[in-house]
Amino acid sequence: MQPRFTHVALRVKDLARSVAFYGKYAGLVVCHERVDDGTRVVWLAERAEDPAFVFVLIPMPHTEVERPGVHHFGFTLESRAEVDAVAATARHDRILREGPRDAGPVVGYFCVVGDPDGNWVEFSFGQPINPRELPAQPS
């Protein structure tokens, strides 16, 4: 069986702020939540029913646990105008980290926003993830 990428688990300092951030900026909704050993764990997805991929948010408010670094999370949008709108909202909220700008045919047009825990979240247009959609490499 080929492994299938199903989730990313994020440690967060303030669960409610993180749920609100990913709802506001990425349109993610709660598709599952539970309490594990007294800790509320929330799963976010693009749709509440039958999600294909989820963010698992795990609160770690009072501990500084060593963890591997994450460069950024990427979300695609339908247009440059939508990237500009996210950037404008993030600028207003004082969490815009970079952009918007055009980085060429592979990276596309993007901006980077900081989530409540300092993780970088990229919103892009024209950034294909299917290798068949990438520009041909010169021979």
Image (tube, helix red, strand yellow):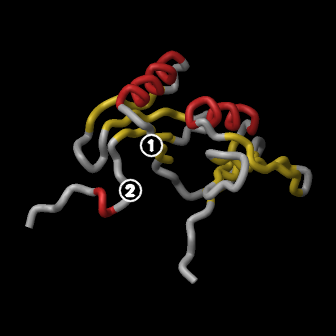
Cα separation between marks 1 and 2: 10 Å
Residue 100 is situated, as x and y percent measured from the top left of the image, at 35, 29
Q: Residue at x 40, y 39 (%)?
A: 124
In terms of depth relative to the viewer, which is nearer, 139 or 49? 49
- Left or right of residue 91, residue 139 in this image: left
Q: Residue furthest front?
A: 49
Q: Residue at x 57, y 83 (%)?
A: 1
Residue 63 visible? The answer is no
Residue shown at the point (56%, 32%) measured from the top left: 25
The residue lying furthest to the bottom in this view is: 1
**Is residue 126 at all visible to an observer of this figure?**
yes
Inspect the image, locate mark 1, and give the three-letter code of the amino acid beneath it: Thr
In the drawing, does residue 9 fall left or right of residue 131?
A: right
At 30% from the left and 63% from the top, the residue drawn is 132
In the rendered structure, find residue 129 and report the number of the disc placed on it. 2
CB under 8 Å between callouts 1 and 2? yes
Residue neighbourhood size for the residue with mark 2, other residues' Cα within 10 Å, grouped as few (<14), some (14–19), many (≥20): few
